[in-house]
């Protein structure tokens, strides 16, 4: 797992001085109004002016004005005054540090680093300056110098809370989550004081498997469940757990979110997606309908609702959800994919083609849409048109593997096996990590009149496919067919059973297994498998034609 690179940083350092807030990416959703932290920003650096530049009244005056302006959140004016103080007394380290703080509050990270570096140069033993320099270095991803400065601070002030916390943030940025968790948890009260820090600890503890710390973080989040300033921390921690597929943690966090939470719809969609991925289609649908009762769903939520309806064999409701998704964002083509697929599943190829044409009107240069068009044309037995569509997709995006795979399938269904094999071999060369090309090529070899002479090549291709997708039902099925052709019945049985374990809904595999059992004299088992085949076969009659024909029962 990678650290939370690009994160927004907290606006205060652990010691109460400046700790910058990094711009976008992981904490992009975390609100961080700079103003509410400003009064504390200069706390550790505000050395009494009489000790700073005695005999330099101009510098003292500029510095005093700058600090007053900073406390009033007037950052540009404060920066101007502190620059004047630095010019009037360039050897006074604290003026450089104060200037760095104000620059940091304006997200001028490089300038802030230069100011803190000068402060450290002028007063290398000042632990506050070192700590603040480390904070900016961490902000900029300069982890080695940040760690060096923090090491200096901790060597001279063991257990320094701010330096310890910052070192934990550096460890997290390096991906050393166990160390990050240990350091951050040792300063739990400081971490728990700010949402951004708590998210970082949650992420580190989650990655390192520290359940005790996770429970402490969740307990803090629970106390802030109704606090708008913590709304994003709760939703962000939930997102971390959901993206990792942790159902228990995600559901636990979701239970803390009140119905009027500003992120309720967004995090609800995350939970619904997680439930859907885990096969909990009815539960995902139920949650989405609850969200719909509180306000309009987003296009993404409508698409997921359509997926749930499809899983529940309710195609008309699915079509309505996809239609709403398309209407919510007329310029977006992604909702069309599910609608087109649904129309094909229903055998409505004309309707599917209408939706393809609508998608092309929106995005004529989108290679994916041309792939959809080719797939619809394959279902309509318009092989020449399908070839043209897949070729157009490849021209628009040479890195689109689906286009090349579809072109091979179109050649295969048009009765051009050599052309199909050629495309699949191109795919193996161009997309060596895509198991589908190995499978398709092997299927063509096995269906070839020269199949006996191509058995070794077929087996090699299928084994390569399994290296990339170990649980491929089709690869195991084809290996079973190959073993059956060779008369290796025990081997064929094992492959067919592996295929069924991966996907029990394919009638052809049960038929093939019934053949194996019949040849082995295991009549009862053969009868059972043949009965399963007969029960599954009718539902497959309207499925898309296979782009890579194999031996059929």
Image (cartoon, grey):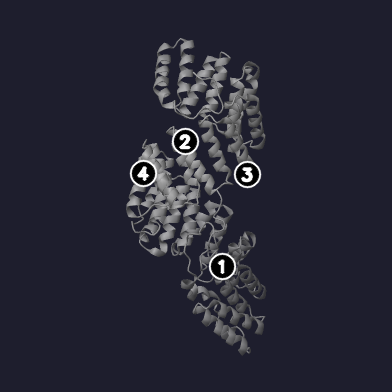
Report how far apart the C-alphas of labels 4 and 2 lie in the structure: 29 Å
Q: How many marks?
A: 4
Secondary structure of the residue carrying tag 3 is helix
Q: Are marks 4 and 1 in contact (CB under 8 Å)?
A: no
How far apart are labels 2 and 1 at the CA level?
A: 76 Å
User: Nearer the viewer's eye, disc 3 or disc 1?
Assistant: 3
Q: Is residue 50 above or below residue 503?
A: below
Q: From the viewer's perspective, is 7 left or right of 327?
A: right
Which residue has dot 3 on it?
396
Q: Which of pointers 3 and 1 lies earlier in the amino acid sequence? A: 1
Q: Earlier in the sequence, mark 4 or mark 3?
A: 4
Marks 2/1 in contact by CB < 8 Å: the verdict is: no
Label 4 to label 3: alpha-carbon separation: 37 Å
Residue at x 46% of width, y 27% of height: 501
Where does label 4 land, which residue?
A: 285
Disc 1 on helix, strand or loop? loop
**Labels 4 and 2: the sequence-earlier one:** 4
The residues tagged by marks 4 and 1 sit, at their Cα atoms, a distance apart of: 56 Å
User: In the image, residue 80 lies at what x, y percent?
Assistant: 60, 80
Which of pointers 4 and 2 indicates the residue nearer the eye?
2
Q: Which residue is mark 1?
A: 157
On screen, residue 2 versus residue 271, left or right, reads right
Q: Which residue lies under the disc numbered 2? A: 350
Q: Is residue 209 above or below residue 450?
A: below
């Amino acid at each position: 797992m990678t650290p939370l690179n690009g994160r927004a940083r907290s606006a205060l350092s652990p010691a109460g001085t400046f700790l910058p807030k990094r711009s976008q990416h992981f904490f992009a959703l975390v609100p961080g109004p700079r103003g509410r932290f400003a009064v504390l920003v200069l706390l550790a650096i505000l050395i009494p002016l009489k000790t700073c530049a005695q005999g330099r009244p101009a510098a003292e005056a500029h510095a005093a004005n700058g600090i007053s302006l900073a406390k009033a959140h007037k950052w540009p004016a404060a920066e101007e005054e502190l620059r004047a103080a630095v010019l009037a007394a360039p050897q006074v380290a604290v003026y450089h540090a104060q200037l760095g703080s104000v620059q940091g509050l304006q997200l001028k990270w490089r300038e802030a680093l230069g100011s803190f570096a000068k402060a450290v140069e002028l007063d290398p033993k000042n632990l506050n300056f070192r700590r603040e320099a480390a904070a900016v270095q961490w902000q900029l991803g300069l982890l080695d110098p940040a760690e060096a400065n923090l090491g200096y601070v901790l060597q001279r002030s063991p257990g320094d809370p701010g330096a310890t916390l910052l070192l934990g943030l550096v460890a997290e940025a390096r991906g050393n989550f166990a160390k990050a968790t240990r350091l951050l948890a040792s300063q739990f009260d400081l971490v728990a004081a700010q949402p951004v820090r708590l998210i970082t600890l949650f992420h580190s503890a989650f990655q390192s498997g520290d359940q005790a710390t996770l429970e402490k973080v969740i307990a803090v989040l629970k106390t802030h469940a109704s606090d708008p300033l913590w709304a994003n921390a709760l939703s962000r921690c939930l997102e971390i757990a959901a993206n990792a597929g942790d159902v228990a943690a995600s559901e636990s966090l979701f239970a803390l979110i009140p119905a009027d939470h500003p992120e309720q719809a967004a995090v609800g969609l995350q939970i619904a997606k997680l439930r859907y991925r885990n096969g909990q289609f009815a539960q995902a649908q139920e949650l989405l309908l609850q969200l719909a009762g509180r306000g309009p769903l987003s296009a993404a939520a409508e698409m997921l609702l359509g997926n749930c309806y499809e899983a529940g064999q309710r195609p008309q409701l699915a079509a309505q959800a996809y239609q709403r998704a398309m209407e919510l964002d007329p310029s977006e083509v992604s909702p069309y994919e599910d609608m087109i697929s649904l129309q094909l599943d229903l055998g409505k190829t004309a309707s599917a083609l209408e939706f393809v044409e609508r998608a092309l009107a929106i995005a004529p240069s989108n290679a994916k849409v041309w792939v959809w068009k080719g797939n619809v044309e394959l279902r309509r037995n318009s092989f020449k048109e399908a070839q043209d569509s897949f070729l157009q997709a490849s021209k628009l995006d040479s890195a689109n593997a689906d286009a090349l795979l579809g072109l091979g399938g179109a050649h295969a269904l048009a009765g051009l096996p050599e052309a199909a094999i050629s495309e699949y071999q191109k795919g193996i060369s161009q997309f060596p990590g895509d198991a589908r090309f190995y499978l398709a090529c092997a299927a063509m070899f096995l269906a070839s009149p020269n199949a006996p002479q191509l058995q070794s090549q077929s087996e090699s291709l299928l084994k390569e496919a399994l290296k990339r997708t170990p649980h491929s039902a089709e690869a195991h099925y084809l290996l079973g067919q190959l073993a059956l052709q060779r008369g290796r019945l025990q081997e064929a049985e094992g492959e067919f059973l592996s295929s069924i374990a991966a996907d029990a809904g394919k009638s052809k595999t049960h038929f093939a297994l019934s053949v194996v059992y019949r040849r082995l004299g295991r009549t009862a088992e053969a009868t059972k498998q043949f009965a399963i085949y007969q029960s599954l076969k009718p539902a497959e009659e309207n499925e898309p034609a296979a782009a890579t024909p194999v031996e059929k029962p």
